[in-house]
């Protein structure tokens, strides 16, 4: 059986290293790269998509840097998301690159709206 192609993957990979700045210096940071396919990263990606407050505190993060729930966690994949700085993370069901970016940006938009910040990028910092 042939694996389905992830048509949004190249689009997602193009964000690697970018920083988007919103009003009041809220920032989106993207770190995405290909890695060897494994049980922990079956999609072959290492990623960290984060929104930071002006003081640098992470407000939202989607990543696969570690397992959620410790060593005995029954989930082998490391895909999860954080809703606050000290949040240990909630499992995230990675489907494809386009869904990942949509889910992340939807959470970012909610957080910015709650803080009275427009969901409009005012500048992009180069890679």
Image: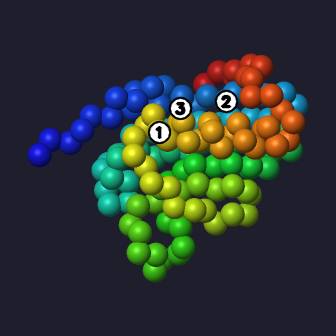
Q: Nearer the viewer, mark 3 or mark 1?
A: 1
Q: Quadrant of the C terminus?
A: top right
In the rendered image, which residue does mark 1 sit on?
Answer: 99
Residue name at image x 53 percent, y 36 percent: 101
Residue name at image x 73 percent, y 63 percent: 86
The colour style of the image is rainbow
Instruction: Assess disc 2: are there few (<14), some (14-19) or many (≥20) residues with their C-alpha within 10 Å of its C-alpha.
Output: many
Q: Nearer the viewer, mark 2 or mark 1?
A: 1
Residue 97 percent across, percent down from the top left: 43, 37
Q: Label 2's element?
A: strand
Q: Mark 1 and mark 2 in contact (Cβ < 8 Å)?
A: no
Q: Label 1's element?
A: helix
In the depicted view, which residue is nearer to us: 28 or 95? 95
Residue 16, labelled with which disc? 3
Q: Is residue 12 above or below residue 77?
A: above
Q: Is residue 121 above or below residue 97?
A: above
Is residue 25 at least partly visible in the picture?
no
Q: Is residue 81 above or below residue 12?
A: below
In the rendered image, which residue does mark 2 sit on?
Answer: 19
The answer to whether 87 appears left or right of 91 in the picture is right
Q: Earlier in the sequence, mark 3 or mark 1?
A: 3
Instruction: Assess disc 3: are there few (<14), some (14-19) or many (≥20) residues with their C-alpha within 10 Å of its C-alpha.
Output: some
Residue name at image x 85 percent, y 41 percent: 115
Is residue 82 at least partly visible in the picture?
yes
Residue 63 percent across, percent down from the top left: 54, 51
Q: Earlier in the sequence, mark 2 or mark 1?
A: 2
Residue name at image x 75 percent, y 23 percent: 120
Instruction: Assess disc 1: are there few (<14), some (14-19) or many (≥20) residues with their C-alpha within 10 Å of its C-alpha.
Output: few
Q: Label 3's element?
A: loop
Occupied quadrant, residue 109: top right
The answer to whether 26 appears left or right of 19 in the picture is right
């Amino acid at each position: 059986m042939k694996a389905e192609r992830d048509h949004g993957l190249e689009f997602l990979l193009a964000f690697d290293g970018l920083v988007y700045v919103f009003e009041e210096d809220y920032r989106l940071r993207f770190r995405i790269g290909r890695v060897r396919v494994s049980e922990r990263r079956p999609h072959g990606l290492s990623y960290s998509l984060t929104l930071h407050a002006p003081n640098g505190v992470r407000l939202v993060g989607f990543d696969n840097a570690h397992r959620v729930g410790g060593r005995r966690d029954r989930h082998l994949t490391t895909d999860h998301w954080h809703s606050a700085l000290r949040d240990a993370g909630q499992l995230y069901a990675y489907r494809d690159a386009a869904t990942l970016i949509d889910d992340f940006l939807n959470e970012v938009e909610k957080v910015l709206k709650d803080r009275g910040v427009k969901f409009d990028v005012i500048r992009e910092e180069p890679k």
